[in-house]
């Protein structure tokens, strides 16, 4: 098993709360566990605090096709990291937009978490 010097662990529901269709009752019940501006702020703070010697960031989630893709894509878009875009086609739009909005707010001095 690989050992990493810098690890940030998160758990949040993979809810796309920005989609056009209404959310099911089951999904609505999980909203309390959805991605938040606080998650975005902590992820960005973690990445910003990494030493310059760190050249690769590993992002993964339980399923590996929605939440982690969204975070990787948003870090690529906001911070200029190289990502395999074709591998990220199923990125959760709500997570992507939340993290990207926080990154842009941080960059331009706006309040984090606007949607």
Image (cartoon, rainbow, N blue to C red):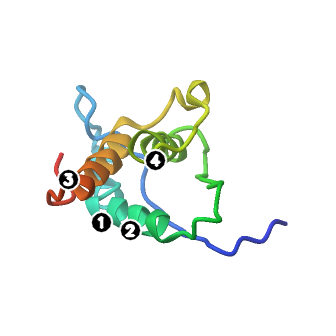
**If you read the primary sequence from the N terminus, does the residue marked by circle 2 or circle 3 appear first?**
2
The residues tagged by marks 2 and 4 sit, at their Cα atoms, a distance apart of 13 Å
Mark nearer the viewer, 1 or 3 = 3
Residue 105, percent across and down?
21, 53
Residue 110, percent across and down?
14, 57
- In contact (CB < 8 Å): disc 1 and disc 2: yes
How packed mark 3 is, by other alpha carbons closer than 10 Å (few <14, some 14-19, many 20 or more), is: few
Q: Which residue is mark 4?
A: 75
Q: Residue furthest bottom?
A: 5
The quarter of the rendered structure image containing the N terminus is bottom right
The residues tagged by marks 4 and 3 sit, at their Cα atoms, a distance apart of 16 Å
Residue 51's image quarter? bottom right
Q: Which residue is mark 3?
A: 108
How packed mark 4 is, by other alpha carbons closer than 10 Å (few <14, some 14-19, many 20 or more), is: many
Q: Which residue is mark 2?
A: 42
- In contact (CB < 8 Å): disc 1 and disc 4: no
């Amino acid at each position: 098993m690989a050992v990493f010097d810098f690890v940030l662990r998160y758990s949040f529901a993979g809810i796309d709360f920005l989609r056009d269709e209404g959310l099911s009752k089951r999904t609505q019940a999980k909203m309390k566990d959805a991605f938040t501006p606080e998650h975005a702020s902590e992820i960005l703070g973690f990445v910003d605090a990494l030493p310059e010697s760190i050249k690769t960031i590993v992002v993964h989630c339980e399923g590996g096709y929605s939440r982690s893709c969204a975070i990787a894509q948003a870090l690529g878009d906001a911070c200029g990291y190289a990502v395999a875009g074709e591998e990220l086609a199923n990125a959760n739009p709500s997570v992507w937009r939340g993290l990207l909005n926080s990154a842009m707010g941080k960059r331009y001095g706006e309040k984090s978490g606007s949607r």
